[in-house]
Amino acid sequence: MERQLVLTPNEKKVLRSLQSRYASIDELASAVGISPEAVLQASYMLQEKGLAQVMEKATDVFSLTEEGKRYAQEGLPERKCFSMLHGPTSLEDIKGQMGDAAGIALGWLKKKGWARIEQGRVVPLGAPVGEDERLLRRLLSNEACGDELTEEERDTLKVLERRGLVTSSTEKAFFTRATEEGLTCAKGIELTEEIAQLTPELIRSRAWQKRPLRRYDVHAYAKPAPMGKRHPYVRMLEHMRSIMLSMGFTEIRGEIIQSSFWNFDALFQPQDHPAREMQDTFYLDSEEPLPPGYERVKEMHEHGGDIGSEGWGGVWSEKMARRHVLRTHTTAISLRYLSEHTEPPVKAFCIDRVYRREAIDATHTPEFEQLEGVVMDKGLSLKHLFGYLSTFYAKMGFEEVRFRPAYFPYTEPSVEPEVYIEGLGWVELGGAGIFRKEVTEPLGIRHPVLAWGLGVSRVAMLRLGLKDLRQLYQPDIEWLRSEPVFGR
């Protein structure tokens, strides 16, 4: 069944005024007696119905900056400089008279061929009136539209724009004309006052029975109304937190500023390890006292303690261990927690921000979120670690998980979990392992500790289909509106 054509009062008014030739929106507004904005809206609605055509015309408009106005009145620097030349003139004299403007003036003198410089002197060659000077004077009295300019004048204005003397903007004008169908339709239009909304007074007086009611097109698409919702990255962090809690873990938090002792030394990371260098770590000009029992960590570094380890040798620096850093991982929080809870069972996790001196690009930022998990209990082994990680990744929606041998200074054995992503293959998503005895023994921990760390932002990129990590932190309102309420 053919749908009946429905026109609003403004569409009817505009259509009755349209002809086969284009008319400007301002002309139509004056003729119809409604605002130009209402005319333009009605014109586009008529265009969707095939009754009108809307043409948009963009025009470049050039005008002077404040500096350009000054030069239009006083003359360009090169013109002022040329007026000083009554013959070959030394560069020192010109610089003395023109000051900071001398460099600009001399550069343009040479570029325009008005003078040459030889043996420390400026030799005039003749300075005709330039096209740029003529345009500056013209713009001083009025703006110039692109339609009025020759190609040569446009090129000159581009040069003046690069010099910061001219600015350009684009002005848009709209024109509308009726189609053949629109002209035919306009002949049968009658303008009558319609009721757009029923009020109690219209109903009580029955006046609505004597006037036509405005028709509404129930098939027309309504304008999307974006809803308020949480940031997709925040939703993902909350989802990870709920998974860990559902698996029986306790959430822990800690300070952003940590001592090097907890961030590096307690993890049996040697004090000459490359990760401690300034290019990886944000160091602060402050310190904190070493905790009681730090001597056991010192002994482990220097001699390997009494567990048969060789340690790292050398002299362990207490001053270096006291120095504050912005935490480079959340393992410092987990280790402090374990040092205060040395009796099993312990299941804890931390989701928080960490800091490293990284160059910002599509896959790196100097601050990012990390998920850290630790489990300490009697008789734990690598198969238990695989079970925890496989369960976590499955709940995150990754169906295929595998583990590849790896090396980390504070775990042995160590693995890197990988998940399979369609179109990308196997993607590494963190590091995991069992804490070495060099880490646990000095802290009084006598049972195995499973530990893993996960870069949350990398998971977010995969789940949200992003190619640039920075998009997670930018206020891109269109992307935020387009993301579904429930993550992918």
Image: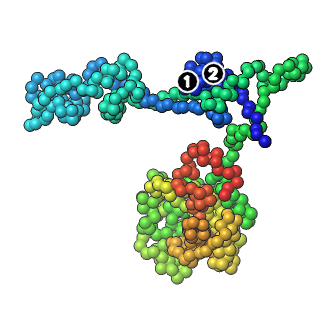
Residue 116 place in picture, x, y as percent: 14, 34
Q: Quadrant of residue 113?
A: top left
Work out whether 265 lies above or below 234. below
* Pointer 2 with pointer 1, Cβ within 8 A: yes
* Residue 227 location, quadrant: top right
Quarter of the image containing the N terminus? top right
Query: What residue sits right under mark 1 in the picture?
Result: 23
Q: CA distance from mark 2 to mark 1?
A: 10 Å
Name the side, left or right, on which 267 lies relative to 186.
Answer: left
In the rendered image, is residue 448 in sight?
Answer: yes
Q: Earlier in the sequence, mark 2 or mark 1?
A: 2
In depth, the one of 480 and 356 nearer the eye is 480
Check disc 1: other Cα within 10 Å, few if <14, some if 14-19, many if 20+: some
Above or below 172: residue 234: below
Corner quadrant of residue 137: top left
Q: Amino acid at mark 2?
A: Ser
Q: Residue at x 62, y 31 (%)?
A: 180
- Tell me the amino acid under the disc marked 1: Ala
Could you tell me which residue is drawn at 52 percent across and 59 percent down? 328
Label of residue 17 in the image: 2
At 59% across and 57% down in the image, what residue appears? 465
Residue under the image location 72 percent in, 38 percent down: 220
The circle drawn on residue 393 is none
Location of the C terminus by quadrant is bottom right
Q: Where is residue 126 shown, x and y percent of the image?
A: 14, 27
* Neighbourhood count class around disc 2 (C-alpha, 10 Å): few under 14, some 14–19, many 20 upward: some
Under circle 2, the secondary element is helix
**Of residues 384 and 239, the one drawn nearer to the viewer in this rendering:** 239
Q: Is residue 370 visible?
A: no
**Residue furthest to the bottom:** 308
Closer to us: 207 or 87 = 207
